[in-house]
Image: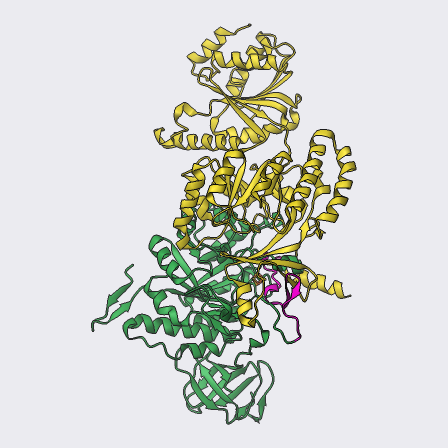
Chain colours: A yellow, B green
Amino acid sequence: MIEFDALEKSARERNIPVIFKEGITFIIDELKKRKAQSVLEIGSAIGYSSMMMAANVPGLHVDTIERNEACYKEAVVHIDEAHLNDAITIYHDDALTFDTSRLKGASYDVLFIDAAKAQYRRFFEKYIHFVKDDGIVIVDNLDFHGMVEDPEKASNRNTKALVRKIERFRKWIKRNDDYHVDYIPVGDGLCVITKKKHTLKLAVHLNDISYLYDYLQLGVKRIIVGGPMSAYTLHKFTLEEIEEMSQRIPDLYVMLNGLYDEHEIPKLKRVIDAYAKMNVKGLLFQDFAVLHYVKNRYDDLDLMYAPMTLNTNYKTLNVLEELGISSAWVAKEIPLEEQIEIKKHVNIPLMIQGHGVQYMMSSKRHLLQSYENAVHKDFDLDHVMLEARESDYHVHIYEDERGTTVYSENKLYTLDLLHDLSIFDYLYIETNYMSNIEAIEVTHAYSECLRLYNEVGSQEYVHRMKDYLAMMRKISKPLDRGFLNDSTLYRLEDVKRRDNHGTM
Amino acid sequence: MALCKRAPDGHRMIIKKPELLAPAGSLEKLKIAILYGADAVFIGGKEFSLRSAASNFSLEDIKEAVAFANEHHADIHVTCNIILHNDNLEGIREYLQALDDIGVKAIIVADPYIMTLAKDMGLKLEVHVSTQMSTLNSEAIHFYQEMGMDRVVLGRETGIKDLKLIRKRCPKIDLEYFIHGAMCIAYSGRCMLSNYFSRRDANRGGCSQSCRWYYDIFSNGQKINASEDDIPFSMSSKDMCLVHHIGELCEIGIDSLKIEGRMKSLHYIATVVSTYRKLIDTYCEDPDHFKDEGYVEELEKAANRAFCEGFYDKTPDDTFQLFNLRDEHPTQEFVLRVLDYDEKTGLAMVEQRNYFKLHDKVEIFSPVHKNLYFEIDKIYNEDKELVEKANHPMEILYIPVPEKVFLNDMGRKVK
Ligand code: SF4
């Protein structure tokens, strides 16, 4: 191996941070193993690490960015002296504001971030797009000398803030299915983050435990279940059943998605405590009580913010991410274009509804019972539908101990839109008001189409999807597009204008 | 601040009175609300507010509102409570800055992005968490408290038992509670009926009130309201009125009592505000000898739906709901507003607000004196000529009134 020991020594003597020997040796081996051709490095310092990589990996090109002018100038001299100008392109710029269109080597096999730890997350988000699928990102150890585990160990305020920032980055990476993290115990430790190919995965609302394996076999990645205190579900499993499922499924989410009264809070906490002890991966929630309770208590419990109607812009989701949510369910009452716009501007995993009846309203009141009492009639409250006199849109309405919930009769479908939806992380199938057969058939159609789209190619998907769609039109009706192509009005002037046009 | 003290004669008094917060859909209504005793008035701006209708204020109007409120030691709260979509994101920062510069006391916000933005900008104004967030418990309130919020407007589903616990567990943040007005049947912010039925966005102020429509109802495919005479299904709540519980709310130290109705009439605002004003003042002056008499009758004069007590004691049942829209009745008619009174002649100068004629019986009500009943025995027009009836909107007239009345007193027809 070609080494630049004098350079390393001189850097250390001047307190310029350079990577330790075992670290760079590991990286060089990794690059060779991957037959890497290109590396992007954030933070060149005086050029030591880029020179080590370029000199020891045949055919490798290194692009490297350095903000500090003195370092940059010195690096240029060293690179020159080592005759590595052809193998290394060094930019003098702040990586956070750097114009990425100047990057010649994209996409890269490896991104090496060797710069301010506090900015890891921002560097990562900015440059990850220039890394190939299955490429890797190497960063310094995220276990900041044990302090990440326990921020209070850090002595001063700045360090504490830094530790917290790194900790958030670590959690975020861990929770994002697009990445896989390995800890490499060389020297102080390195993190190797593998960028997996992004795919849209299926999430199913499970209504019947006996079909669990069928769904898993169909390739459903995430199972979402109702339990004690859940809202918006026609089936609620017991804690025992959920415990049992959690042992069998790696990705089980439980709905803790009601709005809770003060007197329910002790019970809510007990239920959360129970889930935290199980292998439950996350909670769907809408009441910030859940977020507040879980946030500083149960690190491993993911929190998907699912208020049904409120997730309609990206800035709010970014604020909520800072406040502790780890993923979110985007409102379905906005056009697809806007949903995609949201996905482009947030960095947490997002779920969208792909199929099934659509949530419309919930009330704490028992509206059906009230009606029954008011008109002195007895009827079966479990299978009730309403037809508005001013609209031909029909709805399901049901009551449980949390109150009344209204769902559309029409089922949203997106089987033919997977290309547009593939930017999202989870596609949710709502099985409320579906028979088991219908739920399985529908899931099968989506899972096959997703497989075709992801693994075979979009032509094949488009071709075969038509058959599945025809089948679905028969078994899962009536279908509609919800708000995907449609926006709502809210200014009175606009409403008037529309209604006038309607009658003209 | 201590809640109570003893008066010199030994009787108990409540010194921490709750703020009485009233709605206003126009400058005129806002002024009346303040003159009739509101401690604070909430209004909607032209942008970022639900009820994106004519009832919203421009920045110029808000400036005037704040100036008027300041003169009368009242506060202005501005609602910025829409749930933002991507295309609503622009201009918020500038708008909040403008509100702060004008000197509004508080903004009422539903979207966490606006909450954080207002705090990050270091504005002087308070940030109140809107009822649209359906906040019902102390754990959620602590979350908002950590975000730096100044007040939480509780969800309408909060009952008195829970409210007491919440007050105890959240002593350091202002709590606002809804006492009077129309109610959504749904959890606020979680209703998309209007979006689905009418393609109008309820969370941005476009609600078409689909809940109050008539629905045919089917169980297992059988129509339940099968015959013509059967009452169809609907989801319409009676209006909330907690007139009998104001004392209890004062006792537990709720910071603000809210009246709903930015779209309501001048008459409604004057009647409701002045009734609660008198009630709160009388109660707090001597809570142990308070008599709950006459208040509800007064409120009914401005009501067009029957009253219920919402979730105060229990989850509402069928008696809290209107299954038949014929249950709605017109309010007593508001016919005149007093502009001046001449003690020598006993003539009041009034502005006509609705049709009235000779021999109508009228009741004058006021923030400063008791209600006054009399029959109109003469009407003079602006040129002091006798006329039979008042049928021109806003015309100036003179009528003899047996006792002294004041500017902004109002008259309603008694049936
Ligand atoms: S439809 Fe009714 S319940 Fe729903 S938001 Fe509108 S007023 Fe409220």
Q: Is residue A343 above or below residue B414?
A: above
The image quarter containing residue B221 is bottom right
A142 sits to left or right of A388: left
In magenta segment, residue B214: yes
The picture places residue B110, in percent across and down from the top left corner, at 51, 53
Residue at the spot 49% in from the left edge and 7% down from the top edge: A5
B56 sits to left or right of A297: right
Image quadrant of ligand 1 equals: bottom right
A103 sits to left or right of B410: right
The image quarter containing residue A377 is bottom right
In magenta segment, residue A53: no
| Camera-nearest residue between B273 and B398 | B273
First to last magenta residue range: B200-228
| Camera-nearest residue between A31 and A466 | A466
The image quarter containing residue B322 is bottom right
Q: How many marks?
A: 0
